[in-house]
Image (cartoon, rainbow, N blue to C red):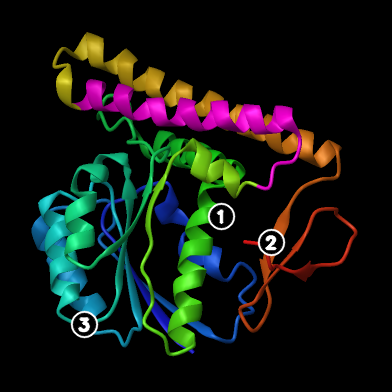
Amino acid sequence: MVRVTFLKIGFLGVSNLIEALLDERASRRNLSVRVVSTGCKMDEDEAVEAAKLAASIRSDLYVVVSPNAALPGPKAARELLKETGKPIIVVSDEPTKKIADSLEEEGFGYILIYADSMIGARREFLDPVEMALFNSDVLRVLAVTGALRLVQMELDRVIRLIEAGEQPELPRVRITKERALEMSGLNNPYAYAKAMASFEMARRVAALSTEGCFKVKERDRYIPIVAAAHELMRWAAMLADEAREVEKANDSVTRIVHFRDGSLRRKRKLYEKFEPLIDL
């Protein structure tokens, strides 16, 4: 039994379902998961308090999920968890790439998802409904393009090594469009192209959200900018959906599932049986 504790500081799109990626039907017998979260807050006091709680949980692996892991809150949290001596993987977004080398030097693994873009967090625009809709759009993009599968595969790889009693080699992965699409399982070339466009559209959202939230001060200017960011993410999700529908129409959707022992099996047609996964 491998025990994994997820510490969530603030929210990314991937934050919503990351632990569920490892046990989609609640059937695994070799995995136990706990989750500690600060909610949407990312300040240092909140992060440290949550990290102390996470450190008190018996764990073989910690996964720290947050936007911009260079900020004081996420930094303090992982430094506190490092005192446990357990392996730690940071899951974050593109801005974290500026500290990727230092994360590796300090012994942390990392998975940086370049399409998991910042939300348009302006009070005049972002209400709870808009927040939920944005995150649902992000999840669709990450799911179809292969980004979520790559996160899942990297975490599963580390879990298998821990289960075998080996010292795990932690991931140092930057999920660009090419890295994501390698794991997407998309077979039709047009579906692949649609998914690639979807990923890049979602990645562009971060620039608009950053501009509208931090750079532009005039209310009449920043409101349409953050609204445009959300419209762009919506269309990215629609394009991802089109890619998925092409694969469904061709009966070529790749499905990779966990069995009870944690092993992975795959099939590419709806009615065929699963076969052991040996080439990923």
Tell me the crowding category of disc 2: few under 14, some 14 to 19, or many 20 or more residues within 10 angstroms, Cα based. Answer: some
Query: Measuring 47% from the left and 77% from the top, which residue is drawn there?
Result: 159
Residue 255 falls in image quadrant: bottom right
- How far apart marks 3 and 1 lie (CA) works out to 28 Å
Q: Is residue 139 visible?
A: no
Q: Position of residue 191 (x, y in %)?
A: 70, 32
Q: Which residue is mark 3?
A: 85
Amino acid marked by disc 3: Gly
Query: Measuring 44% from the left and 39% from the top, which residue is drawn there?
Result: 176
Element under disc 2 = strand
Considering only vertical position in the picture, is 214 above or below 138?
Answer: above
Query: Measuring 22% from the left and 26% from the top, which residue is drawn there?
Result: 213
- How far apart marks 2 and 1 lie (CA) works out to 9 Å
Q: Position of residue 101 (x, y in %)?
A: 21, 52
Residue 134 falls in image quadrant: top left
Element under disc 3 = loop
Amino acid marked by disc 2: Ile
Magenta region, residue range: 185-213
Q: Which mark is residue 272?
A: none
Along the viewing direction, whichever of 261 and 73 lies nearer the viewer: 261
- The secondary structure that dominates the magenta segment is helix
Q: Which mark is residue 256?
A: 2
Is residue 262 shown left or right of residue 274? left
Q: Are marks 2 and 1 in contact (CB under 8 Å)?
A: yes
Amino acid marked by disc 1: Arg
- Going from N to C along the chain, the mark reached first, 2 or 3, is 3
Along the viewing direction, whichever of 222 and 247 lies nearer the viewer: 247
Q: Position of residue 13 (x, y in %)?
A: 42, 46
- How far apart marks 2 and 3 lie (CA) works out to 32 Å
Element under disc 1 = helix
Q: Position of residue 178 (x, y in %)?
A: 52, 38
Q: Which residue is mark 1?
A: 149
